[in-house]
Image (tube, rainbow, N blue to C red):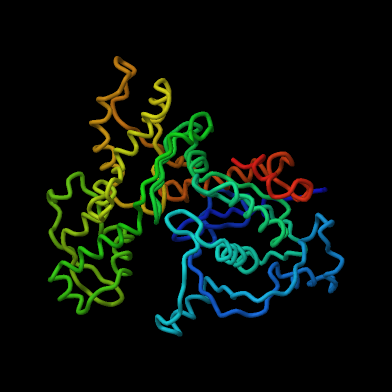
Amino acid sequence: MHFSLKEESYVVIENGSWKIKAVIGVTDTNQLPSVLLQTEVGKIPEMEVEKHDPEMLQEDTGNPEQFTSDSPEKATPTKIVKEPKYICGSQLKEFKEQFKGNFVTSYPIKRGNIENMDELEALWRHILLKEFNIKRSRNECPVIVTVPSTWTKVQYEQIARIFFETFNSPGLYIANQALMALYGCGSLNGLVVDIGYGKTEITPILECSIQHHAIQTIPIGGQDFDEYFHSLLLSDPQFIEEYGETPDIDIARALKESADICEVLLDAGNLEDRPIRMEVEYHGRKFTVGPERFRVAEPIFDPMLVNKVGVLSLTEAIYLTISSCEPDKRNLLWENIVLTGGSSMMKGLKERIKTDLAPYLTFSDNTGEYQVKEAKFLKIPEYFTNLKDRQDLAGFLGASITAKLSFPDPKGFLNKVDYNDHGPSVVHTKSY
């Protein structure tokens, strides 16, 4: 197969429980995602549709019959079936406003794991066909898809089938999110702490090799921060009086994501010189928020606050992960920690983690001048001026760089010929 793939056609998709980030074109890797899509899908009752939408193949030819399974250049048509129609993006927002809570939606990725592949496919379809206006019949856009370590081989094969058979993609690269985050910070060795919406994943990587046996996953993330903060707000009589009604969880999320309101302290009980209450404005309402704003991230340091029995704290999990690696490699991990994920951006979080890790360093097996004195964190390099302060985009940046390096090399990714010759299982030979 002849490929004439161009950097401006490379697609990067980073999947998440709360949002999916995407961009088309990696000529300039110093760019923010052009698409931020809520990982939420609405469902309309069953209707007749074609599973792989072969009508897209008729755009130029008017004859879908010429595209058969023997044609590596085209997607395979399928029969008409009855199934739900999925909606997402701005259309979903309109439906939710129109039906005012009577319209049921779902999240295809929960706690970092796929709950519904059909719904996830609908989100990818929206990104490729609507946001990027890619035509299936002449798709020249290879895709790099980033996934967490917990996704299975079967799911990898499902992803390959969707992108090659449904979207007619010319190339596919499935990349590990932790590895991409490390690349985004310019390192080949390190410990990636990804605090996402549904979970926190701690992944050690040595010489680009993921140490799967040592990965720790904590079922606590931004979702738990929101729920915990919401419960704290509900227990504040002054806040309830000033707000005027019982707040929903959206206000807790909005306040958490505001740069200057919530903060992680070294000691949540010691406000130092910070004011006890802060005046804020939300949707035209003015009110004050008390010291609860300093306790938003406490569940990750004390899981019992959100009734997570038997769950390690973040610092315990980090220590266990590093201790599970070879003793002579542990210094590389202590000195190259990447803090990333959508819930990692709270002010003071990195400093709190660093302080709480300090006691564990005294347990080090290495003594003498080479003993690590403190945990050190990596950052996105300064020359990525648009991204250097966005550690949550480290994985997105790493994926963009990987696409730029891999897609020009025919052996650097899975192409349509590979897929047609060997089937979905070939994805395991070219996934990282």
Q: Position of residue 361 (x, y in %)?
A: 28, 27
Q: Position of residue 16 (x, y in %)?
A: 48, 56
**Image height of 154 relative to 277, above or below:** above
> Position of 65 compared to 187: left or right?
right
Residue at image point 23% right, 76% down? 246
Q: Position of residue 41 (x, y in %)?
A: 51, 70
> Position of 409 compared to 36: left or right?
right
Q: Position of residue 86 (x, y in %)?
A: 57, 73
160 or 45, which is in the foreground?
Answer: 45
Locate the C terminus and report the quarter of the image it occupies. top right
For the image shown, how many numbered marks are present on the structure?
0
**Image height of 374 relative to 271, above or below:** above
39 or 132, which is in the foreground?
Answer: 39
Residue at image point 51% right, 74% down? 42
Residue at image point 39% right, 22% down? 327
Identify the image quadrant of residue 167: bottom right
347 or 200, which is in the foreground?
Answer: 200
Furthest toward the bottom, the residue is 98
Residue at image point 49% right, 47% down? 150
**Image height of 198 relative to 190, above or below:** below
**Image height of 138 relative to 58, above or below:** above
5 or 192, which is in the foreground?
Answer: 192
